[in-house]
Amino acid sequence: MNLSSEHCNISDWLRLEATVKASVYMVTFPFVTFITIIIITIVSQNSKLRKEVRYILLCHHLMCISSYCGLGVVFQGMRALLANSPVVLCWVVFGVQLSFGEGILFTLALMAVNTYLAICWPLTSVSFVESVKYKILAGTWIIIVFKNVCLFIIEGTKSTSVAVLRSEPLCPVTLNSIPSRAIAMVFLLLLLSIILISYFLIYQEGRRAGHFNRSNIKARKTVLIHLLQISLHVIPTLIFIGLGKMCGKFFSALNLVLFGVFAFAQCFNPLIYGLWNRELRSRLYYWMCCQFWCGHTMNDRGPV
């Protein structure tokens, strides 16, 4: 296995690609982190919201997005600046970022299933979900970490220890083999199937109960917006995994386009899944008023 990206013979183009990605991450990371901190603060300060599974999953989802973008700054920054980092360090940073990226989709699937249970089985699901929520989250991360560690071990066996410990100016992209991409594709399609089946059952129950009639535009709009947002996550990822990391300016340009769509989805996730929620919006307004009022009160009092 050739660990270097130089066999593509377009190292300047790959560095430009990394620079663009790092720049985008530097914009999305503070934006997403700012909204994430606000939402987590609102949830943590309210005892009722802290106990609800949907808000626990939402906070978990937002932390995955923020961590993913932050590690994107690190990894793409290492590539753009030609940091000459050891290959094993590149693998670790990329692997952790990949794990948080899969955590984003995993939490989306769990949020969809939780919504389905709350709507279709409101009486029997509450106690069950409450009893298993932390076990499911722990199991989710065990599955993600175990899968990625196994994939990296398989990739590492194809290289010598000297090659793994060698420093590379342009951090190589790994997990590009056909088995790794096939496993990633199956993993992604499984999560997508869970999300689509959950939303289909929610829609069926909504139609049966009369929630999706013409007068209830907001309910239908919420489902459509969520599905559109999920498609912006999944479609670019499916195309990227299917094509793999190919050489050539066309594939690099296509990679940037797909990355742009994915980054757009990352930015709007906190808004759609967080601030689209009416209860969170009302509490955000109350929280901002309290911060503004407390700040003015302290200023009016002056130093004691």
Image (cartoon, rainbow, N blue to C red):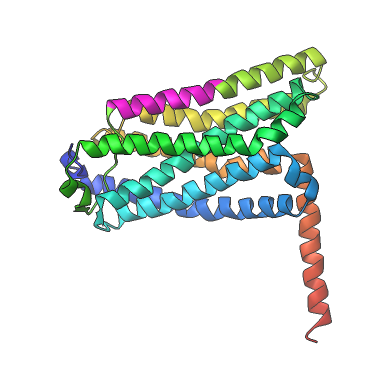
Task: Describe residue 247's horizontal placement relative to residue 59 as left or right.
Answer: left
Task: Describe residue 161's horizontal placement relative to residue 265 as left or right.
Answer: left
| Residue 40 shows in this picture | yes
Q: Position of residue 110 (x, y in %)?
A: 61, 31
Q: Position of residue 191 (x, y in %)?
A: 52, 26
Q: Where is residue 221 in the image (x, y as percent from the top left)?
A: 70, 27
In the picture, residue 213 is in which quadrant? top right
* Point 23% across, 35% down: residue: 247
* Point 78% across, 12% down: residue: 208
Q: From the viewer's perspective, is residue 187 above or below residue 266?
A: above
Along the line of sight, the residue nearer the viewer: 178 or 246: 178
Tell me the quarter of the image containing the N terminus.
top left
Q: From the viewer's perspective, is residue 148 above or below residue 72?
A: above
**Dominant secondary structure, magenta:** helix
Q: Count how many numbered circles sit on residues in the image.
A: 0
Tell me the quarter of the image containing the C terminus.
bottom right
Magenta stretch bounds: 178-193
Task: Describe residue 178's horizontal placement relative to residue 189 as left or right.
Answer: left
- Does the magenta portion include 189? yes
In the rendered image, the residue lying farthest to the bottom is: 304
* Point 80% across, 68% down: residue: 294
* Point 33% across, 29% down: residue: 180
Q: From the viewer's perspective, is residue 285 above or below residue 224?
A: below
Q: Position of residue 77 (x, y in %)?
A: 36, 55
